[in-house]
Image: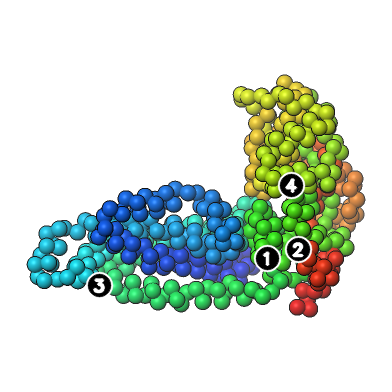
Amino acid sequence: MIQFFHFIISNRMELYQQTIEHVGLTLIALFIAIIIGLPLGIIITRYRKFSTTVLGSVGVIQTIPSIALLGFLLPLLGIGPVPAIVALFLYALLPIIRNTYAGIDEVDPSIIESARGMGMSNKQILMNVQLPLAGPVIFAGIRTATVINVGIATLCALIGAGGLGEYIFRGIALNNMNMIMAGALPAALLALFFDFILGVFQKHIHILIRPLLITAVILLFVIPPIYFYHTSTTVDQFKLGLTPEFTERSDGYPGLVKAYNLHTPTVEMNSALLYDALKNNKVEAIVGYSTDGRIQAFNLRILKDDKHYFPPYYCAPLVRDQTLQKYPELKPVLNKLHNLLNNVIMSKLNSLVDQKHEEPAEVARNFLKKHGFSTRVIRNGSPDIIVGGKNFTEQFILAQMFKTVIENNTELTVGLKTGLQGTKICFDALINGEIDMYPEYTGTGLYVILKTDSTILDNLGTDRQKVYNYVKQLSERRYHLTWMKPVGFNNTYALMMRNYEAQKLGIQNISDLARYISKH
């Protein structure tokens, strides 16, 4: 607990910024939903033939997983707060429209007839009778929508919209509980706070409904400028796109800043979105993977690591010793993949999945078949071993390769658990026996898994064999894990820019980029 409070104090300014972003996303979307949803709910009480269509449509939206909805919006609206606000607005519509319709519909007809008998018009009946009586039900819908949006807003960090989800996803990627709690606890407190405040208002809704509606309209014009003032001060600045994991890794952004004196605003997002964000001019540079198939397809330039900051990231199967002892036939089979792949080949395989939308299993089998491997056997039934993988294209392909090679050269059945979020999730699953192996990189083993001392890092340098030998020996001794022979390619982290922009600015390496940023 002391460490958690120390973390909060040390990162209080960033936490404040994320909280402002989170509240802004939630309230802007909520106020838009109120202004649109409340009249729509009233309209369908007047034109009941449309009620089934309207309520059914917003109900269907509510069933769409939030990650999927954000994915649908990205091609239309790009990354950042706009698609996030649209998604939150859509999720807030159902409880507001449904409760407005239900609240007005449940007003006693005899009361309405009495109002008509007193000479009231339809407008007067709505404003002076139906809305005040339906107020508690309507406000309950707004209250529900608010709490839902506070929770869903954490996912908006995956598309570069900011908010408290940034800490949550960083913490998940790095298995840092303090970081996870730093995002999750304020989000939970915000939900409880808003629910409490709205609960107090709900008790006096009969006299507050009109002032609250007027306030919602006013705040819709006040909050967005405040929100964008706090979150968009870097609009005209050079922005660097990063994954949550890279933001905090010891071989990630903090070390990159020190090595190159590279100080620039950053945007965090899911790794699958980085390249599209760069292609579509949402950021000026990204930290990606050197074997990614989209580098050539999007005409990107990898900036030379002229200070040799990034260590070698040669890929190899990382396997539990217990698994190898139980199934000794695995070792010679997996070592058949030794040096089978290089950077060019891996990049092309990734491109087949990313650009041509081929299935990873098909890509893996076709490649292995071309190189003389048998790919006929596809086993079903309870798996003997489980192959894991992280949540990017290359890992899906490699996991399928491991599965195909094992099943065609042994009697073992292989199950897959791919798409795991981050290094520590994969590694912990391996240690706990939830998976038996997964593709890992020597540089990641050196920095993230083994947390190697700086003195040893200086001694190892960027020597490929030294790094491999070190992580192999120490992983065996410390965790009882075996690094198989590397499959051949070096998927190091790399800074990338759009090629035409790099040419225009005369940027060839990371030092050039650092100098350019410092001058501008």
Q: Which residue is mark 1?
A: 281
**Crowding at label 1, few (<14), some or many (≥20) Cα neighbours within 10 Å?**
few
In which quadrant of the rendered view does residue 385 lie?
Answer: top right
Left or right: where 109 falls relative to 361: left
**Residue 484 at x, y percent in the picture:** 82, 36
Who is closer to the viewer here, 392 or 170?
Answer: 392
Specify which label sits upstream in the sequence, 4 or 2. Answer: 4
| Residue under the point 77% across and 68% down | 501
Q: Is residue 502 above or below residue 356?
A: below
**Residue 87 at x, y percent in the picture:** 49, 58
Task: Tell me how far mark 2 sits from mark 1, CA to CA.
Answer: 9 Å
Q: Which mark is residue 207?
A: 3
Q: Which mark is residue 351?
A: 4
**Crowding at label 4, few (<14), some or many (≥20) Cα neighbours within 10 Å?**
many
What residue type is disc 1 on?
Answer: Asn
Specify which label sits upstream in the sequence, 2 or 1. Answer: 1
Query: Can residue 332 be spotted in the picture?
Result: yes
Provide the secondary structure element on which disc 1 rests: loop
Task: Tell me how far mark 2 sits from mark 3, CA to CA.
Answer: 58 Å
Mark 1 or 3: the one toward you: 1
Task: Tell me how far mark 4 sits from mark 1, CA to CA.
Answer: 21 Å
Provide the secondary structure element on which disc 3 rests: helix
**Residue 508 at x, y percent in the picture:** 85, 66
Left or right: where 125 falls relative to 399: left
Task: Tell me how far mark 1 sits from mark 3, CA to CA.
Answer: 49 Å
Colour scheme of the picture: rainbow
Mark 4 or 3: the one toward you: 4
Specify which label sits upstream in the sequence, 4 or 1. Answer: 1
Q: Are marks 2 and 1 in contact (CB under 8 Å)?
A: yes
Q: Which mark is residue 498?
A: 2
Specify which label sits upstream in the sequence, 2 or 3. Answer: 3
